[in-house]
Amino acid sequence: MENFLSLFDFFKSKIRYIFLIYTIFTIYMNSKNCFINYVLLIFLDVILIIYSFIFLNKKQKYPFLFIIISTIVYAFIWLFGHCDNIYYFIILDDIFEIKADFKKKLLVAIHSSAFMMVTLKNLIFKNYDLHEILSSIAYSIIIYMAILFVFIFIHKFKDERDKLKILNSNLIEYSFNEREFLLSEERNRISQELHDSIGHSLMALSMNIKYLKGIKNRSNINEELDNMDKVIKESVQTLRSTVYNLKKLDECCDLKKEVYDIIKKFNRLDIVKINFDCASDIEKSTTTIKNTLIKTIKEGITNSLKHGNPTEINVTLTLVNSYIKLIIQDNGVGCQNIKPSAGLNGIKKRIEALNGKVAFESKARKGFTIETEIPGGF
């Protein structure tokens, strides 16, 4: 079913234009004896082709108006042009793309009413008897309802699939925070350990100093100084050990392993295919840069799943003239007008904090691309 939907989405826009052009041919074949009728219908069909192209490629869309106009114009062409009605059913797919339930039902009512009007007109002018007319009407209704339920099923499946993808991507997004949470917990543990050990040592030193001020015996003073020196050395050792552990914690960043772990999570859920290509030298960059790249990849994948509905995402990390170039590209629905979400703004801030550059590119039905470039920091 998923493969069928992918093919359907790929060919949908092309099929639309193919059948509109085919309509011109059928009008010519069936109406060429009536020049005025022939010219008017072809003119309307060409207008519909141009209008469809403009609508499907412009930034701000009004699908309700587009469907109303398409339904009325093509019903008129079908009524007087004696052409096939295949394109008329393609409009049903546009109707089910609308999210508002009331508008969807209203458009289905208009679409089905126009269908029945054209069907009745064609039957009446064929001089059928009543039995033939009723049989043809029943047959037309059955065909229409069958096609209608096919589109209902397809879009119901797509809606459930999209909801599941968003739910799964949210779950994975939460799991993305696992590493940051564990690092935070470890830092808190080390900080508490530092507070307890150094704090206790400093308190002991303070008490020893007060004690020294109150004694007069030189031998006792030397003994206390030895104890204080021992406490100071232990504190310095504890401090060094803590700093080392914190440094080791920060340096524990394997970029490739992190990204492949991300990919495995998605592969287990069969949500999307992710391809990853990484230049080996990038592992030599600083921990800060690698952590930023990992967060950017996570956010980029999440953004694609939430808004693009892709089947494939390509993640590429290359090194160009000491600059690290990251490209995250999906094959989703894309958009004509990019409105940066909180996630995209977060990517922009993180990259720019490292003196890097970010670019977002997209076109309707041509996917979404995030391209970043930051100094390597080697």
Image (cartoon, rainbow, N blue to C red):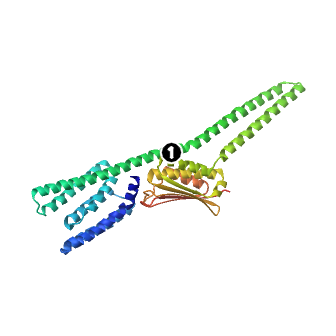
**Quarter occupied by residue 230:** top right
Q: Judge left or right: residue 2 versus residue 215.
A: left
Placement of the C terminus among the 4 image quadrants: bottom right
Q: Residue at x 64, y 64 (%)?
A: 321
Q: Residues within 10 Å of mark 1 (few under 14, many from 20)?
A: some
Q: Is residue 252 visible?
A: yes
Residue at which label 1 appears:
172
The answer to whether residue 372 is left or right of residue 226 is left
Image position, residue 307 (x, y; %): 44, 52
Amino acid at circle 1:
Ile
Determine whether 208 is above or below 365 in the image: above
- Picture quadrant of residue 319: bottom right
Identify the residue at the far left of this view: 129
How many labels were placed on the picture? 1
Q: Secondary structure at mark 1?
A: helix
- Residue 347: image x %, image y %? 54, 53
x and y, in percent, of residue 36 in the image: 19, 73
Which residue is most to the right? 218
Q: Is residue 110 visible?
A: no
Which residue appears at 30% of the width and 52% of the height? 150
Whole-percent x and y of residue 161?
Answer: 40, 48
Q: Is residue 313 above or below residue 29?
A: above
Residue drawn at x 73%, y 30% as measured from the top left? 200
Residue 50, placed above or below residue 190 = below
Vertical order, 104 against 78 (above or below)? above
Pick the front one: 137 or 78: 137
Describe residue 93's horizontal placement relative to residue 31 as left or right. Answer: right
